[in-house]
């Protein structure tokens, strides 16, 4: 196995960000934390994490704008992103945006157990590893 | 002695003398009587003679009388004839008299009636005279009232807050009120006699002008029924080409069964649209803001329960589980509220796709296994073979079936029965969820699909529940073109019609196409 996987957590709510980071560490991941979209883009492009957990509604730059910037980058075009939000994906604009940015996953925070979120991360990374072999 | 003898002799002498005297008396008396008898005889002779005379005379008289009688008999007969004739005449006279009497009576009646009628007519005439006066007064009064009312009505029409236009049967404007002028920036004199459709252009949301034939006004005037679509607002264009969202109602004016014109009222709904937008924004904000702290509690409780930060004692675990369960309920409530808001805002994203309803139901049953087992409920199901795929949003159907099943399990006492069947009927798929549960009180049947409503009997038994489930289910089913209804007591072969637990059966039909 390759070295420790890096996961970027872009989340403005400190308590949630900490919770995810704690569990990620527990599961032997290396969490990177960003508290808004702008910081998220900076960290992503600098550190090239293995996966990004992205909140949508955030100050300074929201999740969709951040995602757009990341996807514009050569490296960022293919990095797996999990939208982890509390905004229900029921409006058409959001659905359209997601399709345009090749989103693979969309999770509602309050409906997902934190350990299930991490399991999802592990599963996606596994699939990525197989694909890249 | 001698003396005595002498006296005696004297006495006898005296007595003889008396006797002699008495004899003489009798003789005299007898002589008288004889004389009287002689006389009498003489008289008798005379009398006999007289009698004979009389007899003869009588005989003559008798003859005369007989003659007379004969004459009299003749006369009597004649008299009788006359009498009879007279009698007949009298009868005739009586008849005539009676007839005359009747006629007289009739005449009297008629006269009396005429008198009464005359009196009545006189009274009527008097009354009429009075009425005419009152009427004239009233007419004057009413004319004044009408003039006032008319002025008032005109003032009311002119100052109605909604725009108002009255058009004739060609759609030419006959009347507009002040609000019309203000809202559209047009003056009365500019528009009277002109076509409403031309004067006030109408655009849809995308700015495309609604064509003449498509205008509600045109349709109403041609007698077509139309259904107002309030979900997609239209816009009216002002004189200065600016536009505003409008909600309008057009009603035909019908006189003698013919459409002679129409009345249109319209309202600027800019404010309503703003409120709508604010509501959507609130929902989105609420979903985010309410869910964030809930997620936080969820995740930390999960981490503690998982022992991520050290072992927890059984007591601590119990308490943490309570915290977690309470939070889960809150999450459920927020989610239900969000669903309701989306239904009401019409922002439910319905993505219909061919859906296998049986498979979907089986997944639901699997998810309910735990609760079914915990309450030792006897669950059964039956699915008709060859149920076709139906075009529906699986996420929404999932929600609907889940709600119905959860309710059945939740509101059925331990050891009760729950049954789910799916059958086919012509063009519909029939889903039925029945139970032997608490049932729905009769007096609350009509409220059961109402938002936030919970029946009294289940409120007593189970304090959890939002009162949103069936409201959401009904919205989903109706959005999908289906129908939902229920019966309680649930008329099912489950035997759940006891008084205490009459049971409930929910029926859902979904169109196949």
Image: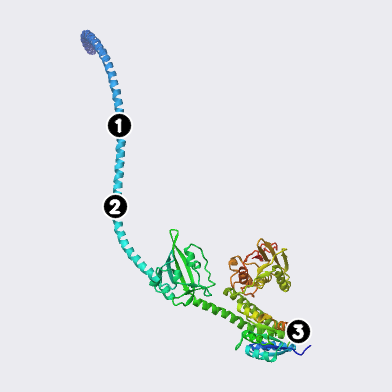
Q: Chain of mark 3?
A: A
In the rendering, at what x and y percent does residue A31 appear? 70, 89
Residue in the picture at 31% in, 38% down: B105
Q: Is residue B115 above or below residue A132?
A: above
Read off the residue under disc 3: A132
Same chain for mark 1 and mark 2? The answer is yes
In the rendering, at what x and y percent does residue B181 appear? 41, 74
Read off the residue under disc 1: B96
Q: Nearer the viewer, residue B387 or B292?
A: B387
Q: Is residue B378 above or below residue B295?
A: above
Q: Is residue B88 above or below residue B432?
A: above
> Which of pointers 1 and 2 lies earlier in the amino acid sequence?
1
Same chain for mark 3 and mark 2? The answer is no
Same chain for mark 1 and mark 3? The answer is no
For label 3, count other residues whose C-alpha is less than 10 Å away and answer few (under 14), some (14-19) or many (20+): few
Element under label 2? Answer: helix
In the rendering, at what x and y percent does residue B270 appear? 49, 77
Q: Quadrant of residue B499?
A: bottom right
Read off the residue under disc 2: B125
- Side (left or right) of B190 relative to B453: left
Residue in the picture at 68% in, 92% down: A46
């Amino acid at each position: 196995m390759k070295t420790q996987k890096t996961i970027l957590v872009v989340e403005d709510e400190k308590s949630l960000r900490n919770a995810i980071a704690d569990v990620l560490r527990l599961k032997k991941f290396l969490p990177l934390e960003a508290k808004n979209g702008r910081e998220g883009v900076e960290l992503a492009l600098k550190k090239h994490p293995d996966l990004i957990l992205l909140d949508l509604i955030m100050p300074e730059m929201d999740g969709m704008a951040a995602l757009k910037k990341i996807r514009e980058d050569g490296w960022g075009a293919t990095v797996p992103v999990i939208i982890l939000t509390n905004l229900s994906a029921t409006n058409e604009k959001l659905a359209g945006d997601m399709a345009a940015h090749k989103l693979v996953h969309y999770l509602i925070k309050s409906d997902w157990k934190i350990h299930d979120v991490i399991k999802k991360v592990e599963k996606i990374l596994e699939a990525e590893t197989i694909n890249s072999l | 002695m001698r003396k005595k003898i002498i006296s005696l002799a004297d006495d006898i002498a005296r007595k003889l003398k008396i006797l002699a005297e008495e004899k003489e008396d009798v003789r005299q008396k007898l002589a008288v009587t004889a004389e009287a008898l002689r006389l009498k005889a003489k008289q008798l002779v005379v009398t006999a003679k007289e009698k004979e005379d009389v007899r003869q005379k009588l005989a003559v008289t008798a003859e005369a009388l007989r003659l007379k009688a004969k004459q009299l008999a003749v006369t009597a007969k004649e008299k009788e004839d006359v009498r009879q004739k007279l009698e007949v005449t009298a009868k005739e006279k009586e008849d005539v008299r009676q007839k005359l009497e009747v006629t007289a009576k009739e005449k009297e009646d008629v006269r009396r009636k005429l008198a009464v009628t005359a009196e009545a007519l006189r009274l009527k005439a008097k009354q009429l005279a009075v009425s005419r006066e009152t009427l004239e007064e009233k007419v004057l009064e009413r004319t004044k009232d009408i003039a006032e009312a008319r002025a008032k009505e005109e003032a009311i029409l002119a100052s109605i807050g909604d725009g108002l236009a009255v058009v004739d049967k060609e759609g030419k404007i006959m009347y507009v009120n002040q609000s019309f002028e203000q809202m559209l920036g047009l003056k009365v004199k500019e528009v009277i006699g002109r076509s409403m459709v031309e004067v006030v252009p109408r655009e849809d949301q995308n700015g495309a002008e609604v064509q003449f034939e498509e205008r509600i006004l045109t349709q109403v005037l041609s007698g077509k029924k139309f259904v107002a679509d309030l979900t997609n607002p239209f816009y009216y264009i002002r004189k200065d080409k600016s536009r505003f969202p409008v909600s309008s109602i057009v009603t035909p004016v019908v006189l003698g069964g013919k459409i002679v014109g129409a009345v249109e009222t319209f309202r600027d709904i800019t404010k309503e649209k703003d409120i709508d937008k604010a509501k959507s924004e609130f929902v989105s904000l609420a979903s985010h803001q309410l869910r964030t702290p809930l997620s936080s509690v969820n995740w930390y409780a999960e981490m503690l329960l998982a022992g991520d930060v050290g072992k927890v004692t059984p007591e601590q675990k119990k308490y943490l589980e309570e915290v977690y369960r309470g939070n889960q309920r809150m999450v459920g409530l927020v989610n239900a509220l969000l669903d309701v808001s989306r239904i009401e805002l019409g922002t439910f994203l319905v993505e219909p796709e061919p859906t296998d309803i049986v498979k979907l139901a089986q997944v639901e049953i699997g998810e309910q296994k735990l609760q079914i087992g915990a309450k030792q409920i006897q669950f059964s199901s039956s699915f008709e073979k060859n149920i076709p795929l139906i075009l529906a949003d699986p996420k929404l159907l999932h929600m609907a079936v889940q709600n119905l099943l959860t309710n059945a399990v939740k509101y059925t006492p331990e050891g009760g029965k729950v049954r789910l069947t799916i059958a086919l009927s012509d063009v519909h798929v029939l889903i039925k969820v029945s139970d032997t549960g608490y049932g729905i009180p009769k007096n609350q049947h009509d409220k059961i699909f109402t938002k936030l409503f919970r029946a009294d009997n289940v409120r007593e038994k189970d304090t959890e529940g939002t009162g949103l489930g069936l409201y959401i289910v009904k919205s989903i089913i109706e959005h999908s073109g289906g129908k939902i209804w229920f019966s309680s007591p649930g008329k099912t072969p489950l035997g759940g019609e006891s008084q205490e637990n009459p049971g409930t059966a929910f029926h859902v039909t979904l169109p196949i196409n």
